[in-house]
C-alpha cells in the first residue's frame, strides 16, 4: 500500500454520517426545532458541513434516507442526484417525510430540479392529503415564477378564491403563496389577486416581526412590487 493510500480519507458511510451528526446534536437546538415540528438538534450550517464531506453520492443518499433519521435525511437531500429519482420514488419520499424542513428541502433541492416536476405537480395538487396537496401548490408557485405558460392562472385564482379560506393550514399556506406569486409576477392579474386576498382575509392578522414581510397576500404583493420598482 502506498503512503497516499494509507492516509486517504475513508469513504463516508451511513454510520460515519450518523456519528458526525450525533456529535453535533445540541439540546437547545432540538428544542427550538421541535417547536417548528422538526425532530433534530443539529445546526443547519453545521449539517451542511457534514454534507460537504460526503459531496454527491446518490447511493449513500438513498441509504441515508432509509434510516428515517431527520438530520440524515437532510444530508441525503443535499448529497443526492435529483435527476436520478423517478416520479414514484419522489412521491413515496414526500409521503414518508414527517418533518417540515425535510419536505421543504425535498421540494426545493430535489423535486424542483427533477424532470418529473410537472407530472408531480399535477398529481399532488388534487391529493386528498393536505400536506401532499400543499406540496403540489408549492410547485404551482414555482411555475408561476419559472414557467407560467404551463398554468391557467385565471383558473388558479378561481380555485384559490373558492377553496383557500377553508383549506387546512398546510394547504392554505401554499395556496396563499401562489396567490401572492401571481400578484407579484403578473401585473395584469395583480388587482384581482389583491382583491381575493382582501376579501378572504387569510393571514391578515398573522404576527409579523419588524422588518419582515407579512404573509397576508395584499401586503406581500405590495411590498415586493415596491422593492422591485425601487431598484428599477
Image (cartoon, rainbow, N blue to C red):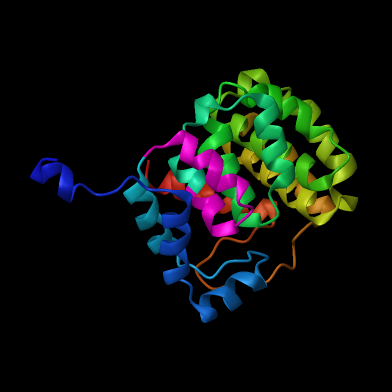
User: Residue 48: horizontal and vertical position, in percent?
Assistant: 40, 55
- Of 173 and 24, nearer the camera is 24
Please report the bounds of the magenta region as a residue range. Answer: 56-75
Q: Is residue 67 magenta?
A: yes
Residue at the extreme front: 1
Label total for image = 0
Residue 37 located within the stretch drawn in magenta: no
Residue, far top? 149
Given residues 31 and 180, the one toward you in this image is: 31
Q: Quadrant of residue 192?
A: top right
Point out the image quarter for the N terminus: top left
- Work out whether residue 105 or residue 145 is closer to the camera in this orientation and state it: 105
Give me the residue at 16% from left, 50% from top. Answer: 7
Residue farthest to the left, as pictured: 3
State the residue at coordinates (74%, 62%). Answer: 204
Position of residue 60 in the picture relative to residue 180 (left or right): left
In the image, what residue occupies the spot 56% across and 50% down?
Answer: 73
How far across and how far down the image is residue 51, in percent? Answer: 39, 50
Amino acid at each position: 500500500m502506498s503512503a497516499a493510500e494509507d492516509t486517504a480519507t475513508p469513504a463516508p458511510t451511513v454510520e460515519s454520517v450518523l456519528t458526525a451528526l450525533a456529535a453535533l446534536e445540541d439540546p437547545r437546538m432540538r428544542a427550538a426545532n421541535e417547536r417548528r415540528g422538526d425532530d433534530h438538534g443539529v445546526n443547519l450550517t453545521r449539517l451542511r458541513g457534514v454534507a460537504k464531506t460526503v459531496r454527491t453520492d446518490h447511493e449513500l443518499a438513498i441509504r441515508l434516507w432509509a434510516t428515517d433519521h431527520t438530520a440524515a435525511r437532510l444530508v441525503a437531500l443535499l448529497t443526492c442526484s435529483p435527476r436520478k429519482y423517478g416520479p414514484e420514488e419522489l412521491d413515496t419520499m414526500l409521503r414518508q417525510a414527517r418533518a417540515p424542513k425535510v419536505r421543504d428541502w425535498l421540494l426545493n433541492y430535489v423535486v424542483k430540479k427533477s424532470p418529473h416536476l410537472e407530472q408531480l405537480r399535477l398529481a399532488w395538487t388534487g391529493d386528498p392529503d393536505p400536506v401532499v396537496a400543499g406540496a403540489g401548490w408549492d410547485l404551482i408557485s414555482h411555475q408561476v415564477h419559472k414557467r407560467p405558460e404551463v398554468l391557467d392562472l385565471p383558473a388558479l385564482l378561481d380555485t384559490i378564491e373558492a377553496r383557500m379560506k377553508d383549506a387546512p393550514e398546510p394547504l392554505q399556506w401554499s395556496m396563499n403563496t401562489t396567490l401572492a406569486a401571481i400578484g407579484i409576477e403578473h401585473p395584469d392579474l395583480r388587482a384581482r389577486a389583491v382583491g381575493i386576498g382582501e376579501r378572504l382575509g387569510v393571514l391578515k392578522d398573522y404576527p409579523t416581526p419588524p422588518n419582515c414581510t407579512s404573509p397576508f397576500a395584499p401586503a406581500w404583493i405590495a411590498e415586493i412590487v415596491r422593492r422591485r420598482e425601487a431598484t428599477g
